[in-house]
């Protein structure tokens, strides 16, 4: 039996392998929104930085973020057919559902895009909280917790970036950082997640979800 009544997943870089697509469009976004273009070597270097450090390096101002995020959501929706789930994600979600754990996806990406990429697995998700938020991811976390009347320690938040771990800390949730997404393991460790998982199988074993038989 799992220790958690709700598991909240980030989407890009956690469930969906969207990094290759993101790398292809990053310099187009830089030209459109007038921030620094980067080489492949710089992109790899930035994976070890915090979100604030990345923004500073690229020369992105906070006031630019809403327009950049809107553009990203639009481009992601158009490219949703190119983006695939990481191996083992459908089985992971089935395992949680089999054990009676509720599943949520909290993402700045659009819900329609998230559902399209999830495909048949979208039916395994109980709650979607997608799109822009003035108050950040932690506010979305707390709203779900209040809605479901859960204690903070009954909620696990899973993500691939420092901001996911930070939002979990702010909400008082247990956190699991996965290393197969955007941020490096070293960058994630600096945020002090409760758990660190290098593979989907390791995430399953860490949180106590049963492995699901493939349908």
Image (cartoon, grey):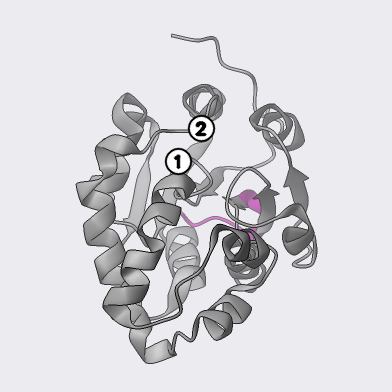
Q: In the shown orientation, is residue 74 left or right of residue 188?
A: left
Q: Is residue 207 visible?
A: yes
Residue at x-position 26% and y-position 36% = 81
Q: Earlier in the sequence, mark 2 or mark 1?
A: 1
Q: Residue 171 sits in which quadrant?
A: bottom right
**Residue linked to disc 2:** 86
Q: Front-most of 2 and 86?
A: 86
Q: What x and y, as percent, mark residue 11? A: 45, 48
Badge 1 local density, few (<14 within 10 Å), some, or many (20+)?
some
Residue at x-position 28% and y-position 52% = 76
Q: Is residue 122 visible?
A: no
Residue at x-position 41% and y-position 81% = 35
Q: Residue 41 sits in which quadrant?
A: bottom right
How far is mark 2 from mark 1, CA to CA?
6 Å
**Residue linked to disc 1:** 16
Question: Where the C terminus falls, by quadrant?
Answer: top left
Q: Front-most of 26 and 149?
A: 26
Secondary structure under the numbered disc 1 in the rendered image: loop
Q: Is residue 150 magenta?
A: yes
Q: How many marks?
A: 2
Q: Is residue 17 above or below residue 39?
A: above
Secondary structure under the numbered disc 2 in the rendered image: loop
Residue at x-position 79% and y-position 59% = 186
Q: Is residue 73 above or below residue 96?
A: below
Question: Where the N terminus falls, by quadrant?
Answer: top right
- Numbered range of the magenta stretch: 148-155
Q: What x and y, as percent, mark residue 208? A: 71, 31
Q: What x and y, as percent, mark residue 45? A: 67, 64
Q: What x and y, as percent, mark residue 157? A: 59, 53
Q: Are marks 2 and 1 in contact (CB under 8 Å)?
A: yes
Badge 2 local density, few (<14 within 10 Å), some, or many (20+)?
some
């Amino acid at each position: 039996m799992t220790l958690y009544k709700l598991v909240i997943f980030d989407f890009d870089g956690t469930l969906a392998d969207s990094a290759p697509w993101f790398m292809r469009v990053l310099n187009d976004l830089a030209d459109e929104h007038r921030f620094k273009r980067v080489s492949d070597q710089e992109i790899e270097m930035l994976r070890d930085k915090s979100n604030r450090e990345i923004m500073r390096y690229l020369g992105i101002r906070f006031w630019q973020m809403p327009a950049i995020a809107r553009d990203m959501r639009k481009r992601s929706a158009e490219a949703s057919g190119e983006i695939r789930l990481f191996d083992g994600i459908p089985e992971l979600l089935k395992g949680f559902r089999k054990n009676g754990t509720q599943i949520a996806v909290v993402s700045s990406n659009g819900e329609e895009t998230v559902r399209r990429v999830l495909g048949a697995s979208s039916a395994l998700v109980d709650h979607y909280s997608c799109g822009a938020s003035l108050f950040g991811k932690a506010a979305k976390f707390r709203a779900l917790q209040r809605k479901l009347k859960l204690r903070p320690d009954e909620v696990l938040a899973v993500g691939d970036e420092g901001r996911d771990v930070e939002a979990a800390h702010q909400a008082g949730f247990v956190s699991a950082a996965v290393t197969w997404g955007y941020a490096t393991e070293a960058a994630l460790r600096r945020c002090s997640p409760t758990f660190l998982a290098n593979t989907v199988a390791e995430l399953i074993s860490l949180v106590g979800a049963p492995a699901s038989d493939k349908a």
